[in-house]
Image (cartoon, rainbow, N blue to C red):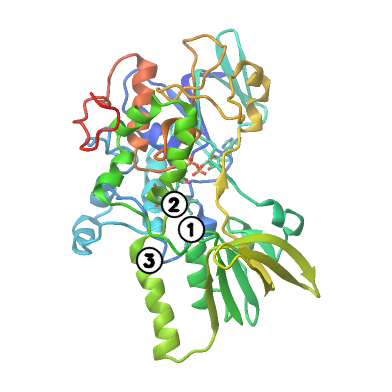
Amino acid sequence: MEQNYNLIGIGIGVFNLSLAALSDKSPGVNAAFFDGKPHFDWHSEIMFSDSEMQTSFLKDLVMGADPTSPYSFMNYLVQEGLFYSFMNTNRKVVTRREFEMYCQWVSKKLAHRLNFGAPIDEVNFKDGKFHVRSGNKFSTADNICIGTGLTPNVPDFAKNFIGPKVFHAKSPQLKDLDVNGKNVVVIGGGQTGIEIFRNCFKGKWGQPNSTRLISSRANLEPLDNSPFVNEYFTPNYVDEFFGLDQDIKDPIVRHQKMASDGNTPEYLEALYNDIYQLRHVYRNDATIEILPSRCMERIEEVNNSYRLTVSSTFTKKEETHMADIVILSTGFRTRIPHIIEPIQNMIEFDSADRFILQKNFSVKWKGPAQNKIYAMNFSRHGHGISEPQTSLMAWRSATVINDMLGKELYPTTNMVPNFVNYRGF
Ligand SMILES: Cc1cc2nc3c(=O)[nH]c(=O)nc-3n(C[C@H](O)[C@H](O)[C@H](O)COP(=O)(O)OP(=O)(O)OC[C@H]3O[C@@H](n4cnc5c(N)ncnc54)[C@H](O)[C@@H]3O)c2cc1C
């Protein structure tokens, strides 16, 4: 028999896990969540021992909406006997591994709502319900929330070379990598790029002959998390931004890139110190090069290795670099999941084929108004720079639940005004 819910979540990444955690304690919400993975993990392929969160652990799955929830990071620490020891570490940020452990702890507590090993294959809509199929099992729901995440971005210049030696950072290849005596090029100067670069020259995968980082950015640029910039990550800012015309939104989001995609300043210091120690204390002459202001032009295969041609925006000249291994730290892009094909003709897309989300995070569609398709992490262009970040995930989950219930179960609109006023009064 088909199970019926008032909410089905598709994908159990951090964002839908946040929704699951909040909905578990929300009277009137009967929700189930599905994911193809065997258990919760958080981009584990690109998690290193030195990978730290870029956001505070207080911005956890639930805290920003319901600090009394049992699924907070603080409660995880207390229940696991870690609270006092953790406090003595004096940390403001936790490692990504520790945040993943917290999420795994929550996912076990929510086992009654979460279905792992259950990929959703198809979503349909008939007779006033969403019909969601996983294998030969069907469930129905009044509303769905798509939280299927982003997909690795493989630039055109690399597409024909993808394999064991040229691959996106989020690939299984990284796990068993052997760089001994090899020339390694990491492409991309975001946080993942510099983490792979540092781990590589420090010997995580063996001793490379050379390690180079190529980035189109002007330098290794720090994450800007100063207080006024951090107001971008507030419900008030989202509210102000949401009302703008699209042609104004796109350049604003581009301008705000370093508030979200910059390098953690502490990590940059550690990286700088490592290179200093190697060069000037241990007099190690391994080739470690940081090559910013370079745009990748092409890759060519030459005698079992690769010639990379880059054009420098600094010198306006072309350069070539040889590599045995090329690791693409070229980010992620939005992908509308194919599983919604049966209902795609009822959904509105913008001129760039993106979902058009309403303020309540529901997708514009031609179906009945009482049946909503919510989507998480699909509206950077609509809701702004905070959308792919954890900063506002609890608030966003609360917004969805309030909208579903038609009442403000969680306080989502009571924020004091920001200090920076963009729109006037
Ligand atoms: C390396 C890395 C580090 C990051 N660090 C931070 C940070 O410190 N702070 C911060 O704020 N943000 C960070 N982010 C950004 C953001 O928080 C993460 O990308 C986050 O994982 C996004 O969550 P999500 O739920 O949208 O997607 P994901 O975590 O990618 O989860 C999507 C899930 O959907 C499942 N799925 C896909 N298709 C289906 C289907 N058809 N059926 C069922 N399940 C499906 C997948 O298996 C997956 O488990 C980081 C991102 C990366 C890549």
* Residue in view at x 27 percent, y 37 percent: 64
- Disc number placed over residue 190 in the picture, else none: 1
Q: Where is residue 272 in the image (x, y as percent from the top left)?
A: 39, 74
Residue 375 at least partly seen: no
Residue 385 at least partly seen: yes
Other residues around mark 3 within 10 Å, as few (<14) / some (14–19) / many (≥20):
some
Q: Position of residue 162 (x, y in %)?
A: 72, 58
Q: Which of marks 1 and 3 is nearer the N terminus?
A: 1
Please state, as top left, top right, bottom left or bottom right, where the N terminus lies in the image: top right
Callout 1 amino acid? Gly
183 to the left or right of 100: right
Other residues around mark 1 within 10 Å, as few (<14) / some (14–19) / many (≥20):
many
Q: Earlier in the sequence, mark 3 or mark 2?
A: 2
Element type where label 2 sits in the image? helix
* Residue in view at x 59 percent, y 79 percent: 210
* Residue in view at x 45 percent, y 35 percent: 16
Vertical arrangement, residue 281 with respect to residue 301, above or below: below
Q: Are marks 1 and 3 in contact (CB under 8 Å)?
A: no
29 to the left or right of 149: left
290 to the left or right of 73: right
Give the number of callouts: 3
Q: Nearer the viewer, residue 327 or 204?
A: 327
Mark nearest the camera among 3 and 2 is 2
Q: Mark 3 points at which residue?
A: 267
Callout 3 amino acid? Tyr
- Disc number placed over residue 261 in the picture, else none: 2
Q: Earlier in the sequence, mark 1 or mark 2?
A: 1
Give the distance between the C-alpha atoms of the residues marked 3 and 2, in whole angstroms: 13 Å
Please state, as top left, top right, bottom left or bottom right, where the C terminus lies in the image: top left
* Residue in view at x 47 percent, y 39 percent: 251
